[in-house]
Image: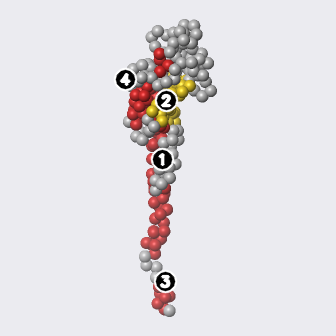
Amino acid sequence: MNGFKTLLRDNRAASAAEFALVLPLLLLLLLGTIDVGRYMWNVGQVEKATQMGTRLAVVTDMIPSGLYDYSFAVSGNIPQGDVVPQSSFPGVTCTSTGGTVSCACAQGGSCAFPTTVSANGQQAFDDIVVRMNSQYGGIGADSVRVDYSWSGLGYAGDPNGSDVDPIVTITVQSLPFKPLSLGTLRDLGLPGTSHSLTMEDGLGRGGN
């Protein structure tokens, strides 16, 4: 009985037991702090990657075949020299599924010009993805969308280039983010981001 009372009063190694109880919370706090930093860093990287991809897109080949070659004056019955109205150019969206790029008229619009992928369109899309991955690895082609929307720039029958100089918007979405504090078992995801610039060249293999 006396031995049992002595054991109850014995507080040796109590600090070790208390530390063992607090350690999981300390580790969770540490990993959580690291996760917040990783998250903010990755968000910044994705935003910069999107800007880099957009910059490349506006000085290289247009992805849809009809945007560069189609004459709105000859085939679209718009007087040469007039601005192509938004009703004639509602916009085009290009995406990749399983590595194959396809383009379609913007939702709710009707495109008289071809929206098929141009001869260099697949390569142009892939180049954009490669450029983005140079800043943030892990951006798959299926997570990237390229939109060409009306800007009011350009004119029908332009003999030196595209009749339209669209606003090019690249959107990145559905990128994973697995926190260390959750054992990388749960994917919380990174927020989608987009960036827009006005088309500059539209026909070329180089970029800056």
Mark 1 to mark 3: distance in Å? Answer: 49 Å
The answer to whether marks 3 and 2 mark residues whose Cβ atoms lie closer than 8 Å is no
Q: Position of residue 118 (x, y in %)?
A: 45, 23
Q: Earlier in the sequence, mark 1 or mark 2?
A: 2
In the picture shown, does residue 142 fall above or below 86? below
In the picture shown, does residue 12 fall above or below 91? below
Amino acid type shown at disc 4: Gly
Mark 4 to mark 2: distance in Å? Answer: 22 Å
Q: Residues within 10 Å of mark 4 (few under 14, many from 20)?
A: few
Mark 3 to mark 2: distance in Å? Answer: 76 Å
Image point 57% across, 7% down: which residue? 79
Image point 50% across, 52% down: which residue? 186
Q: Secondary structure at mark 4?
A: loop
Q: Residues within 10 Å of mark 3 (few under 14, many from 20)?
A: few
Q: Which residue is mark 1?
A: 177
Q: Position of residue 72 (x, y in %)?
A: 54, 12
Q: Position of residue 82 (x, y in %)?
A: 57, 9
Q: Which residue is mark 2?
A: 102
Image point 61% across, 24% down: which residue? 109
Q: Earlier in the sequence, mark 4 or mark 2?
A: 2
Q: Earlier in the sequence, mark 4 or mark 3?
A: 3
Q: Residues within 10 Å of mark 1 (few under 14, many from 20)?
A: some
Select label 3 or label 2 by which is in front.
Answer: 2
Residue 148 is at least partly visible in this image: yes
Mark 1 to mark 2: distance in Å? Answer: 27 Å
Q: Which residue is mark 3?
A: 9
Mark 4 to mark 1: distance in Å? Answer: 33 Å
Q: Which residue is mark 4?
A: 206
